[in-house]
Image (tube, rainbow, N blue to C red):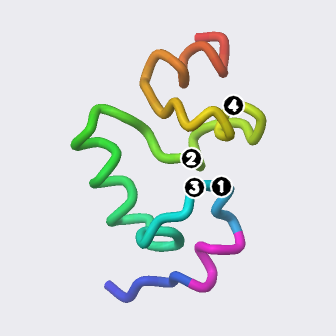
Amino acid sequence: MECKKESNLKNCNCTYSCGKKGMCCECLQYHLAMKQLPACCFPAEVEKSYDRSFKKFADAWNL
């Protein structure tokens, strides 16, 4: 499968400087291995906290 990095970057709301930006497969694998979710799962104001925990996700979406 071909990575669509340029297309992905248009939808990436991550404000952290990282080499995985736009490479969703690598980003998701990285965060899941750390028991986290990537920036794109969070509203912009919550993403800026850099807390990517499952708890923060649930709190952000009132789950």
Determine whether the residue tagged by mark 3 lies in a helix, strand or loop. Answer: loop
Kindly check if marks 4 and 1 are in contact, taking CB atoms under 8 A apart as contact.
no
Determine whether the residue tagged by mark 2 lies in a helix, strand or loop. Answer: helix
Look at mark 1 in the image and give the residue it sits on. Answer: 15
Query: Who's the residue at 72% across and 36% down the image?
Result: 43
Q: Position of residue 15 (x, y in %)?
A: 65, 55
Q: Is the residue 8 above or below the residue 39 in the image?
A: below
Q: Earlier in the sequence, mark 1 or mark 2?
A: 1
**Residue 8 falls inside the magenta stretch:** yes
Q: Which quadrant of the figure has residue 45? A: top right
Q: Is the residue 6 above or below the residue 56 in the image?
A: below
Q: Is the residue 48 above or below the residue 51 in the image?
A: below
Numbered circle sitting on residue 16: 3
Look at mark 2 in the image and give the residue it sits on. Answer: 39
Determine whether the residue tagged by mark 4 lies in a helix, strand or loop. Answer: helix
**Residue 26 falls inside the magenta stretch:** no
Q: Which quadrant of the figure has residue 23? A: bottom left
Q: CA distance from mark 4 to mark 2?
A: 9 Å
